[in-house]
Amino acid sequence: MGEGHVKQRMRQFPVYDEDLDYCGSIKTAEESKMAEIFLNDRKTRRGKGEKRQFEALIDQWICTQCQVLMEPNCFAVFVEHAKGKVWHPECFVCAQCKEQLLDHIYFWNDQEQKVYCGRHDAEKRRPRCTECDELIFGDYTKAEDKTWHIEHFTCFSCDAPLGGKEYVLKDNQQYCCECFAKQFTTKCETCGDNVPFRQCLSAEEGGAVHAWHGSSKCFLCAVCRKSLVDKTHFIKNKTIFCSFDCHRLYKRFEK
């Protein structure tokens, strides 16, 4: 068994989806019971496709995946959960990730009439933790379209729990506000002082992000000095303007 085969097996059939002894995140008796019910249900839908050659085609068989008519004497995959359905071997893939099902092992979804690999069959029924990759059978938190065990949703820097708290996402990592302020402090374009995260107003210009204190003293028109907090404005060369009239005046003064 080659390395690629092993990696594919681990990806399609995570061991902690199959054996509770490997589920380090199950903490309570209630979670264990839910996991047992989940595993017992999976056993009824798990199967191994049978690859065999047609000796002759009395009826017209069509591949379930590609919808192409099967050729005489070709090889095909049959599954016990879906009588009357057949696949080309190369078409016997997970309905979600489209990977060929390793060793023709599948999980049958009766409602959808589709086959899935172990990983994506499990995720149709339980959320998966982004941090540890295990399925979640208890309480969890959801953010940025991802799910975590509550104890695993933590600051990337200090590991403080972030469930129900304000956080900042940077480079696909979540930070508590304190760590973000310490590590990614920006300077105000108006006064030059550091800008605390909660007081920051920012804007992107030419791929660069500029920041200001979100106060009437700093976030204001460079010409008329009117506060632009929560008001219409535009940025030009790191400078804030309330209108094109003020921008034209500013350009005159520059000359």
Image (cartoon, rainbow, N blue to C red):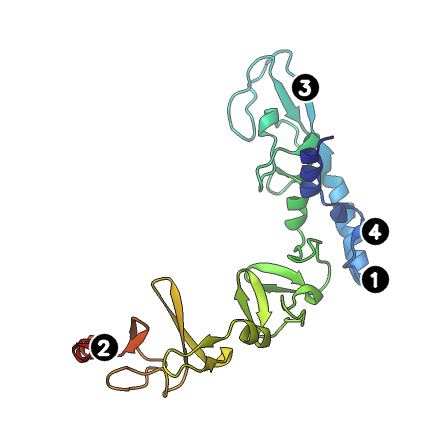
| Mark toward the start of the polypeptide (1 vs 2) | 1
Q: Which residue is mark 1?
A: 29
Is 237 positioned to the left or the right of 168 in the image?
left
- Circle 2: residue type: Ser
**The quarter of the displayed image where residue 225 is located:** bottom left
- Circle 4: residue type: Asp
> How far is mark 2 from mark 4, CA to CA?
65 Å
Q: Which residue is mark 3?
A: 52
| In the image, residue 176 above or below residue 146 | below
> How far is mark 3 from mark 4, CA to CA?
36 Å
| Mark toward the start of the polypeptide (2 vs 4) | 4
- Circle 1: residue type: Ala
> How far is mark 4 from mark 1, CA to CA?
14 Å
- Camera-side residue of 219 and 66: 219
Front: mark 3 or 4 = 4
The numbered dot on residue 243 is 2
